[in-house]
Image: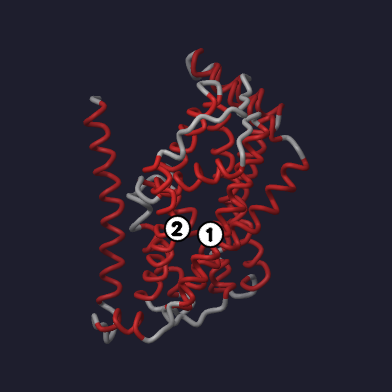
Amino acid sequence: MNARFKSILIFLLKLVVTAVPAYFVYRNIVMAPDWSVDDLYRLFSTHSVWPLFVALLCLGLSNFTACLQWKLLLEKQNVKLGYGHLLKLYYVGLFFNNFMPGNVGGDAKKVYDIRMQGGQDTVGAGLTATFFDRLFGLFFITLFALAVGLLFFMHDEAQRSFMWPSVWIFFGFCALFAALCSRRLGKLLCTIMAKVFPKKINERLIHMFERFQHFRSVKLWASISGLSAVTQALRILVHYFCGIAVGVDLSISWYFYYIPLVAIVSALPISIGGFGPRELLAQSLFARAGVPGLESVVIQLLAYFVSLALSLFGALVFLLGGNSSKSGNVAASKA
């Protein structure tokens, strides 16, 4: 298949996945009893904007801790860059995340920038650290959903069923981490893949598994667990304060229970920027907590615009070329 035709086809499929849920989101809002376009004006005219500034602060703080986690993982891959420089690369990645399908474009940009700092040998190291960083963040936010579900919703028959997706996602991540970091499972998988994939691809996969062995450290896992707990909690609080900004009076436990599922769906590269499926899922989930469809969608959009506003710093760094300067203190593992 022609590469250009394939890319167009993939884009069209993502456009459909974006547009169809978006239509149902719109229909659910306009078909609500007593719906009026004046409801939008009411949301933003009768409440304070200060919670949005608090949401911006929470997201900004989460980026500092998330970048520190990324730095620790890169150092385990023997890629050593200053925290300030990495923070610039991180913000450029955030900017690209807001404009690329599935919120993964920024990850590719960060890997590319790491390569520009240290040469070809850092490609595998940057990819491994960035991939693990993204996975661990999603894993930890799932832990929040499970913990809150057990504490507050286990005895609520109407809400208990929503724990099952988090349970399966949790065990899925556990199996994946075991496969990536376990030497025995890694060797077994490599043996199986040797019979399936061509030799060249299999050699690259073996190198990838060898790189993941660098994360076999109790100290590292303790450090990134603490950082992920702070990072993901702050990012859930962004939605909570966006809810306050539009007058939603809802316990914070609901956000810690539902937002992880929304985050998992929006991270999938199946739509344009996560739009559509994210809003439809949030609308469906928060309706069970008594939140009207309009408010639940506006909360997601406000959280996105807060992220967009903060990522403009990354756009500035990118335009000024601050992410492409060579650094003399980069070492790269050649494993």
Tell me the CA gap for discs 2 and 1. Answer: 7 Å
Locate residue 67, reporting x and y percent: 58, 47
Q: Residue at x 72, y 48 (%)?
A: 223
Q: Quadrant of residue 209?
A: top right
Label 1 neighbour load within 10 Å: few <14, some 14-19, many 20+: many
Locate residue 248, reporting x and y percent: 46, 80
319 or 123: nearer the viewer: 319
Question: Is residue 73 shown above or below 277?
Answer: above
Question: Is residue 315 shown above or below 322?
Answer: below
Question: Is residue 242 shown above or below 38?
Answer: above
Label 2 neighbour load within 10 Å: few <14, some 14-19, many 20+: some
Q: Quadrant of residue 173?
A: top right
**Tag shown at residue 181:** none
The residue to which callout 1 is attached is 60
223 or 290: nearer the viewer: 223
Seen in the image, is 251 located left or right of residue 298?
A: right
Seen in the image, is 115 located left or right of residue 153?
A: left
Element at label 1: helix
Q: Residue furthest right?
A: 218
Locate residue 281, reporting x and y percent: 41, 63
Q: Amino acid at mark 1?
A: Gly
Seen in the image, is 213 located left or right of residue 97?
A: right
194 or 306: nearer the viewer: 306
Total labels drawn:
2
The residue to which callout 2 is attached is 310
Q: Residue at x 64, y 59 (%)?
A: 230
Q: Amino acid at mark 2?
A: Leu
Q: Residue at x 58, y 45 (%)?
A: 84
Element at label 2: helix
Q: Badges 2 and 1: C-beta atoms under 8 Å apart?
A: yes
Q: Residue furthest top?
A: 199
Q: Quadrant of residue 42?
A: bottom left
